[in-house]
Amino acid sequence: MHVTDVRAHHLRAELEAPFGWSLHATATRQALLIEVRTDDGLVGWGESGSGTLPDAGRRFVEELLAPLTVGVDPFDLAGLWQRVERTFDRAGWTTGGLPLQAFAGLETALWDLMGQATGRPVWMLLGGRVRRRVRAYATGLYYHPAAPDPSAAREREARGYAERGFTAMKMKVGGLAPDDDVREAERIRGAIGPDVALMADANGAYDAGTAVRVARALESLDVAWLEEPVARGDLAGYGEVRAAVGMPVTGGEHLGGLDAFREVVARRAVDILQPDVANCGGLAEARRVAALARAFHVRVFPHVWGTPLAVAAGLHFAATLPSTPATVDPVPLFGDPVFEYDCSPHPIRDAMMTDDLRPRDGWLDVPDAPGLGVRVDRSVVERFRVA
């Protein structure tokens, strides 16, 4: 079996209303899907990045990665990665960003092909699973600038997640003044009650001092973690926040390649590392990152923000993660990973989604079908395709 063709599909959808976080507001959702064909008729799919710069990624895949991949046996993944890594190293692209995001989708598609060729799910090819299902948390509660009453809209949204069976959810902070964000968190906590876990994500909005002040206020609301409290490159700031507060500090969603994670883990800048398969370089690199984190006793909870291809890849990865620390009966959110399930507006994701990748009673089942276990509807690809 050899690769005969690599195609990148840039998809885009307009939203009915914009939503935002501390860094950005958007009225669109985008995706970059990678399709890989072989000489025996198999087709593998993967997703590149978290919906950022998809057209630049499309060109990168087709002009640089496709020529390196055509003719390769998908099972020769190590050899392909070495050729790609050498190319990236010459250009200084080994510490994240678009090149590794682009490769991640291609690499994931090759795992999908290997699974189809062997009749086995990807988690089995990765060495086997630790768990058959993963506790999901709803990622939503973004800012709604166009809503008549943005705060009330977030309260309704939070209650809706609880009614759908989610026992955990994550809200955005950092887009308002610190005291206003804390008041928003108070309203959301009031809406969902004390028994639903609530997390907060600042997307790097604060300096260390402000992050500490906000974190201490959020601790009184039993917020389970503060994600990306400072800029992702400010490892000293991460350390200051960790030292000053009791709640876990998390981060790592946009990092790519093992080098980018090394100092974060070695310095214990975070309590929980959040690599994204679609950003970090693919499933094999995510596994290497997880092994690095385990060596330093850092928990790993996957970040996911994409279509069902990203969801499935993240689930196969999460299925293989050992509990940290190991206990007889690990508890989700503590020793056992929880899984990010994006509930923000995404017409492409919604059109592609199938029931087997939807949470049931707050849990997601790990796919058992060969490969990733996702069948891509080409009519959906054509409907949203930009190029």
Image (spheres, grey):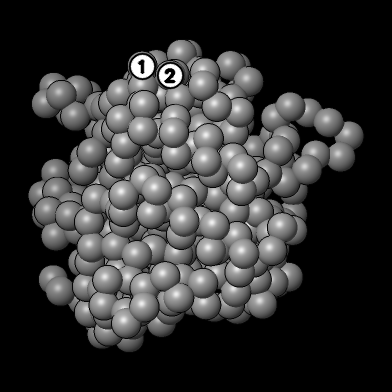
Query: How far, Cα to Cα, is label 1 from label 2?
Result: 6 Å
The percent position of residue 292, horizontal first and vertical second, equals 52, 21
The percent position of residue 387, horizontal first and vertical second, equals 13, 71
What residue lies at 25% left-to-right and 27% top-to-bottom?
94
**Horizontal relation, residue 218 to residue 40: left or right:** right
**Horizontal relation, residue 61 to residue 224: left or right:** left
The percent position of residue 277, horizontal first and vertical second, equals 43, 45
Name the element at disc 2: helix
Amino acid on which the number 2 mark rests in the picture: Glu
**Horizontal relation, residue 111 to residue 22: left or right:** right
Examine the rendered structure and indicate whether residue 24 appears above or below residue 220.
below
**Horizontal relation, residue 386 to residue 148: left or right:** left
In which image quadrant can residue 42 be found?
Answer: bottom left
The residue wearing badge 1 is: 236
The percent position of residue 190, horizontal first and vertical second, equals 62, 64
What residue lies at 43% left-to-right and 76% top-to-bottom?
153
